[in-house]
Image (cartoon, coloured by chain):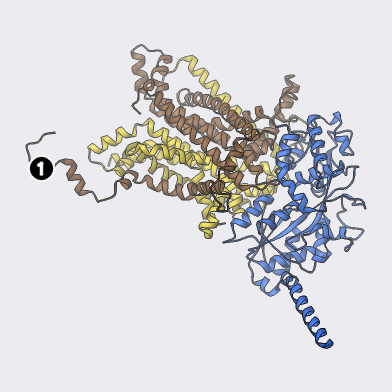
Chain colours: A blue, B yellow, C brown
Amino acid sequence: MKRIKVGVYALVACVLAIVLALPVVATAQQPDPAKARAEGKIVSYGQPDDWANWKEIWQVFCAKYGRTHQDTDMSSAEEIAKFKAERNNPVADATEVGMIWGPIAVREGVAAPYKGPGWEKVPAWAKDPNGHWTGMYVGVLTFTVNTQIVKNVPRSWADLLKPEYKNSVVISDPRTSGTGVATFLSAVFANGGNEKNLDPGFKYFAQLYKAGNMKAIGRNLANVQKGEAPITIGYDLQAASWRDTLKGQVPLEVVVPSEGVFLMPGAIVINQWAPHPNLARLFVDFILSDEGQRLFAKGYAHPIRVIAGNLTLPADLNPKPITQLGSSAKYVRDWNAASLLLRDVARRWAQEVLGQ
Amino acid sequence: MRTTRLGSVLGLILSAGFIVWSILPLVATALFSLSTRWVTTALPEGLSLGSYQAMMREALFLPSLMRSTLLAFGTLVIVAVLCVLLLTWVHIRSPELGPPAELISLIPFALPWVVVALAMVRFYGDVYPRILNTPLLLLLAHGAVSMPFMYWSLDNNLRAINARVLYEAGATLGARWDQTLRYALLPNLGPGLATGGMLVFASSFGEYALSRLLVGMGWPTVPMWQATLINRDARVTSAVTMVGMSVAVLASLAITFWASRLRGEAAVDANR
Amino acid sequence: MTSTVATKPLVQRHRRVRPAVPAFFRRIGPAGVFFLYMGATLVAPTGYLLWSSVTGGKGSLFTLELYIRVLTDSFFLRGFHNSIILSALSAVESTVAGTLLAAAFTYTVKASSRNVLLIVTNVAGHLGGVNLAFAFVALLGTNGMLTIILREVFGVGLYPEFSIVSLTGLNLVYFYFLTPFVILVLHPAFRGIRHQWIEAACTLGATRVQFWWYVGIPVLWPSILAVFILTFANAFGTYSTAMALTVGRVNLIPLQIGFLFSEAAFDTELADALSILMIIVTTACVVAYRLFLRRTARWIGQKR
């Protein structure tokens, strides 16, 4: 009697184990390199050449698999809208979205889950538990100051409110730019808020606007090059590349605000209807591998695995990272809560900050 | 026409003033593209052709120029044919088609073209997905959104030449509609086709939103190529703008030339 | 028309010769190609927008909830207000300037230089979107070419009272690219003013002003009105130039639509509703155009 009972328990345990393991097995779906080689070129959205060293990353990846690559830059919303609209004749395989768009991509049903060998190495706060979206690298929000125009370089968010910076601070609008969203979030965290309490951010920018310090102009390289943007707020990886590009023309200093380091990751999403799914998965594996992550560092981005602690970069890295992450960096932990931000920011920004 | 002295002088001053005003932004762009450094000074600190050299070294330089030019001329042909057929018919036979045609021709102006692009992608994604992400779709889209530019200048032209009277004169002589079109109307449509054509070409050549969302980098046009340079060096971006201007000038010359030949051809035919 | 010869009436004879095509197709004729083409490429996707805005995009019941939401929201109403005022102002300015310039080109410039002028006009109107915004920033920004020249050579300080990124600045930029448009679209209409009329009027003792008031402008009036409506619609729907220049500092409806599928919102149905409302505004323009044309018909001496 006892042996039968044990036998039944064992059988039930086995069945349970198989049933529970199935989802894991299903999403593992190891890509087949042979099939990948048979697939055509890999197409991505939102990964322009001059951002975070995507150019070299794609070059190395394509050389590995003998395929070609094509990318078209667009906003996160456009990428998701296009994935959905093209489902009957898809062309794109993967896209980079702002982290707060990961949950939206899941909700719209356009993200394919995938957990490759690199997935484990990404920290839990920077990925979707089911593998729908995964952070790859982070950027730090910094001030880029044109030291020819601005003699007294601001060192903190509080500094920016000073009257000497009237009509000098240029930010990206959070309604149209991922950098703008990150800028907003970093001000939120710098002023004591978090992803569930955005009020400090709105208050801060309303102050900045009322003080007349927020210059009404687009944040782009052209305006910096032309001397129209004395102080800009953006990712350190872009600040570094602008600083290099404008060497000899415009002297730029990159400043991390003294309130602390704020990190913002970029997420990769694989198209549910990807025409080249194997290539897409191999690509995700590649960018989470040691080699891929190191290539991000070459573009001044901070590889996510360095934050997680399972990858160390050589001390003599060239080029040197432009900011040090330190140990007390702040970042969003609950991206689902943060994505609810999307419902409010557009309206609240217009009304509370711009007074429209 | 004899104008008063005052009239001529005023007219010339106005025209000259307008020309100066028009080229100011172009001068600023050109100066920036030629500058070595231009941050806080009234004029660039130095000039160099470096950004033009960098631009011509770009792999996409010639291919995108060819694509945009081809696309713009293709758009021009589609729009010209459709508008001529429509407007001559409306002016001559069925004026009641005027209001619906006017409304349809204004839709591209009413909507931001990003909206049009996404609407097309979503609509064709459901109805005819095979056409998505093809240059053909982009050509058809350009034809549709450039329609207002040709429509209204041709409309003005036909109204000016009193098309209905010409048609009736031809009809009493036994001409069919298409004969009237070819021999009586078309030779007089030079101005409308020329100015409308210039506008259509310029609009199609410089169009960005539809190119980005309908085909993207699968078929890069000049504005798409220019967008890839935005974060590299803004002077090269300005250099591309100047190149676009030059193509617009050349195309306008060609279009004006062809339009003026319309009148010439008819004169030849009449003397046969 | 009487005839002693017992033949069938002309009309009937023609009817027998023509193929039996339904009246509808005969009325549409070759214009049908236009309607088919625009129907497939533009009207159908617009219809899709309409459908999406009234069904929430998921095929649910017909609902006007989105429209009510927009029309009762003072934020969007302010956006419509700003857009309409900006477009109307720009349209009036550029139509007046464009008409005068088109007249100047036709009557005070030699015929040989006219084409050159038109080509320069077209090139000026070619700049658009990001390029135009940057050109004006390079010209009238805080460190712009004209700003510095005005400050240092003429002692005129534009800033801080003026900013190129404001409704005023936008008005200037709109004026810049709309005036060439008006000139080019209106230019063919001047062919309708016959030289013989001018000379006849002069022989009868009319001054030039009288000629233009009683003959010239009435003849051109439908075209001028059409161009005004057109310019208004053009300005109303302008998105890329406004976005590139102001990045949302100004509350305009096309920008609000853009924000709904950019980086901080994802509401395609609301965007569709706003777009349909924009089309409704434009339709109102066409209707107003037709009505105004009919009301002034007596003045311009036409039956239409």
Q: Is residue B136 above or below residue C294?
A: below
Q: Is residue A350 left or right of residue A213?
A: left
* C68 sits to left or right of B58: left
Crowd class of label 1 (few under 14; some 14 to 19; many from 20; radius 10 Å): few
User: Above or below — where is C237 with respect to C36?
Assistant: above
Image quadrant occupied by the N terminus of chain A: bottom right
Residue at image point 66% right, 49% down? B56
Q: Position of residue A3 (x, y in %)?
A: 83, 88
Q: Residue at x 68, y 69 (%)?
A: A278
Q: Image point 51% across, 51% down: which residue?
A: B139
| Amino acid carrying mark 1 in the image | Thr
Q: Is label 1 in a helix, a strand or a loop?
A: loop
Tell me the subunit letter for badge 1: C
Residue C274 in sight in this render: no
Q: Position of residue C176 (x, y in %)?
A: 59, 30
Residue B101, percent across and down? Answer: 42, 40
| Closer to us: A16 or B246 | A16
x%, y% of residue A221? Answer: 75, 42
The residue beneath circle 1 is: C7
Against A102, residue A197 (above or below) is: above
Residue B180 shows up from this direction: yes
Q: Is residue A225 above or below residue C186?
A: below
Nearer to us in this view, B205 or C161: C161
Query: What quarter of the picture does the C terminus of chain A occupy?
Result: top right
Question: Is A10 displayed left or right of B153 in the figure?
Answer: right
